Structure formats: C-alpha cells, structure tokens
Image (tube, grey):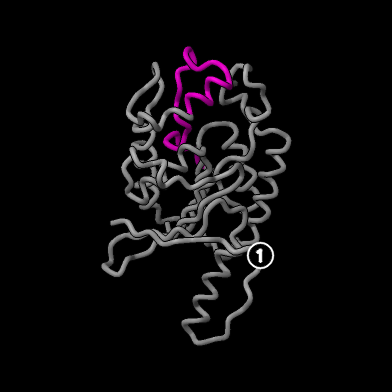
C-alpha cells in the first residue's frame, strides 16, 4: 500500500430521524436519498484520478451505510469490495442506548473516559486496538497501490490516532474533521532514516485533483520549471512521520 484514503460513508437514514426515534439496526440504516447521491458523485470524482491511484483495493465496514457507499465507489473504479469488521463503528449496548438522542450523548461523552464501557458496548480503547490492527495488516497489502477504507467517523479518528502515534487520551487534540462522503488522504513513504513514514496529503476531501496538482507542482519546482496556477481551492496539508 502506497496511499490510504480513510473515507466516511455517505449520509445515512439515521441523520434524518427525530431525536426520540429508536436507533435502527445497521442493516436498516442504509443511505438516505441524499446520501446515495453523495456516494455516486464522490465515486465519479474519484474515477477522474484513476490513473494516479494505481491498483485499488476497497475495504469496508460491514455496516450497510458503508457497504453501499463502497459499492458505488468500486463500481466506478472497477474494483472489488472486501468487508472487514475491524473497520466497524464502536459497538454500543442497545439495551442502554436506545434512541438517537441517547446514541449522540454516548458518542459525545466517550472521549472523557476512553477506557470505560457502557454495558456490553466497546470503549474508545477497544476500537483503537482493532482499527490499529487493521491498519497494520493493510500496510502489508502488496496487491494494491491505494487502499480505500470506507468506514465511520470514529474509526477514521482512530486511524489518524494510530498513524500519528497519539495517546488515546489526547484524541481531541488531533481531531481531523471528516464529513459524510469525504476522506483524508495519507501517503506512505520512507523517512530520511528509512523508517516507515506517513504524509497527510489532505483533510476532509471530496476530490484528489488538488493533491495531485500539489505533487506535480513540487516536481516542477525541483526540476526548475515555471510554476503553474493550481486548480480549485487550496487544501491545507502537513507531513507527519511515525516510526
């Protein structure tokens, strides 16, 4: 793997429900009509970067909202989809978290005590461990240049935390917002000391054109060629190396 796109599923039915509604099961919480359109448009934009992405693997959480998003993307890119439960959302106890409002409260308070569990649900620490295990296995994936991981906001946060090597107690300090049908782009490369390195190419993206325009601009500058005005809005990006 040379590049990881940690991609949040498109907008699901859950976002349309009143606060007092029961939380739907994962199989029933598919994409809303708006979410289905989001997934289709995102897939078309990613297809424009097909050449630069090289060989592609699409991996998804088992949740319906993720697998539907992944299928739309894979259809445009001519890729197959594999399912990995380690990319799933943080599990909660449905006997204690019953309504949409209770789910939001549970999600929003979790980072205050990342090691605690509510009933039979997972802690933030539990989720970090399994997401980190998936990341370690993805690094050994030699059959793909780009891995697109279609997952949940919480899993994307933990992927970033695992990459940056941040303590789980400091998750809020390195929070990188990722909206529905958006992604973070991470590039894998060797550091000057030849250890494994990551470069965060872009945050909360819905298109890769600026990322590749930046790379081409750096190549031109190294070659002493004149600068070319970049297309589209500027995307802030920073480099982080993890040993």
Q: Is residue 181 visible?
A: yes
For disc 1, the marked residue is: 232
Image quarter of the C terminus:
bottom left
Q: Is residue 220 left or right of residue 134?
A: right
Q: Is residue 198 left or right of residue 32?
A: left
Of all residues shown, which one is farthest toward the bottom?
224
Residue 110, x across and y down, in percent: 42, 29
Residue 30 lies in the magenta-colored region? no
| Residue appearing at x 62%, y 53% in the figure | 206
Q: Is residue 56 above or below residue 108?
A: below
| Residue appearing at x 50%, y 36% in the figure | 61
Q: Is residue 72 left or right of residue 146?
A: right
Estimate how packed mark 1 is, as few (under 14), some (14 to 19) or many (20 or more) residues with alpha carbons within 10 Å.
Answer: few
| Residue appearing at x 52%, y 53% in the figure | 203
Q: Considering depth in this image, is 27 or 242 the residue closer to the camera?
A: 242
Residue 198, x across and y down, in percent: 39, 58
| Residue appearing at x 28%, y 66% in the figure | 194
Residue 47, x across and y down, in percent: 64, 57
| Segment tinted magenta in the rendering | 82-107
Secondary structure of the residue carrying tag 1 is loop
Of all residues shown, which one is farthest toward the top?
95
Q: Is residue 38 above or below residue 47?
A: above
Of all residues shown, which one is farthest toward the left?
193
Residue 155, quarter of picture: top left
Residue 86 lies in the magenta-colored region? yes
Q: Is residue 57 visible?
A: no
């Amino acid at each position: 793997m040379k590049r990881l796109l940690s991609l949040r599923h498109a907008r699901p039915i859950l976002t349309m429900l009143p606060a007092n509604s029961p939380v739907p099961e994962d199989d029933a919480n598919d994409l809303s009509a708006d979410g289905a359109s989001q997934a289709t448009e995102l897939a078309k934009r990613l297809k424009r970067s097909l050449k630069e992405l090289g060989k592609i693997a699409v991996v998804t959480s088992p949740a319906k909202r993720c697998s539907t998003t992944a299928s739309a993307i894979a259809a445009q890119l001519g890729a197959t989809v594999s399912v990995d439960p380690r990319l799933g959302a943080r599990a909660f106890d449905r006997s204690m978290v019953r309504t949409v409002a209770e789910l939001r409260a549970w999600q929003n308070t979790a980072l205050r005590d990342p090691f605690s569990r509510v009933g039979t649900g997972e802690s933030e620490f539990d989720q970090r461990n399994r997401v980190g295990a998936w990341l370690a296995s993805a690094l050994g994936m030699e059959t793909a240049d780009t891995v697109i991981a279609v997952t949940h906001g919480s899993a994307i946060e933990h992927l970033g935390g695992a990459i940056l090597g941040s303590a789980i107690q400091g998750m809020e300090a390195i929070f990188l917002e990722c909206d529905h049908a958006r992604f973070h782009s991470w590039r894998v490369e060797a550091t000057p000391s030849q250890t494994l390195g990551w470069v965060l190419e872009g945050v909360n993206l819905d298109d890769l054109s600026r990322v590749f325009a930046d790379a081409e601009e750096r190549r031109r500058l190294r070659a002493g060629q004149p600068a070319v005005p970049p297309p589209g809005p500027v995307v802030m990006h920073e480099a982080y190396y993890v040993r």
